[in-house]
Image (cartoon, rainbow, N blue to C red):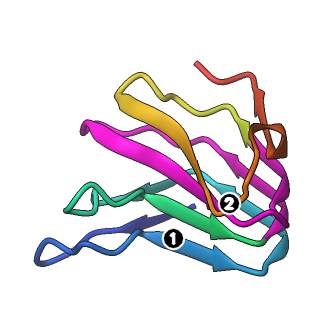
Amino acid sequence: NFSFNLLVPDARPAIVLDDCHHIRIRNFDADIPTREQPLVRIMESKDVTIAGYQSIQSVANFLRLEGKECSDIKLTGNDFSRVNEIVSYRDGSSETAVKMLSNF
């Protein structure tokens, strides 16, 4: 349960996980990055759950997944109605790494 509010626009993702395991992120809010960056960037990480996200702003890309070691990424109970692209994949990451559970 956290919120990131910026004083000035920033191009960096709000959350970056690199080689992280067994992470739970629930009910967060963050200002949208500039320059079409994702809100969340996950690299070479396993067993990550993101739950309870809802934006009042339009989001170009919610999650960028990077690396072939990414696995067991769960998105559950999120409202992606204002998100243009929920997940983008790079650097060998696979669609099989992400499980969409009860999102609306």
**Quick one: SS at disc 2?**
strand
> Which mark's residue is nearer the viewer, 2 or 1?
1
- Residue 82 belongs to the span the image colors magenta: no
Q: Earlier in the sequence, mark 2 or mark 1?
A: 1
The residue at 21%/75% (across/down) is 10
**Which x, y percent locates residue 23?**
80, 68
Position of residue 49 relative to residue 21, above or below, is: above
Give the residue pinned by disc 2. 25
The residue at 51%/36% (across/down) is 86
**Which one is nearer the viewer's eye here, 56 or 85?**
85
The residue at 42%/69% (across/down) is 14
Which image quarter holds the N terminus? bottom right
- Residue 57 belongs to the span the image colors magenta: yes
Marks 2 and 1 sit apart, C-alpha to C-alpha, by: 10 Å
Give the residue pinned by disc 1. 15
Per the rendered image, the range of residues in magenta is: 45-74
Are discs 2 and 1 less than 8 Å apart at CB? yes
Q: Amino acid at mark 2?
A: Ile
Q: Decide whether the magenta segment is chiefly helix, strand or loop.
A: strand
Q: Amino acid at mark 1?
A: Ile
Question: Around disc 1, counting alpha carbons within 10 Å, would you say few (fewer than 14), some (14 to 19), or many (20 or more)?
Answer: some
**Which x, y percent locates residue 72?**
88, 51
**Which x, y percent locates residue 97?**
82, 46
Left or right of 79 in this view: 31: left
Q: Quadrant of residue 51?
A: top right
Question: Around disc 2, counting alpha carbons within 10 Å, would you say few (fewer than 14), some (14 to 19), or many (20 or more)?
Answer: some
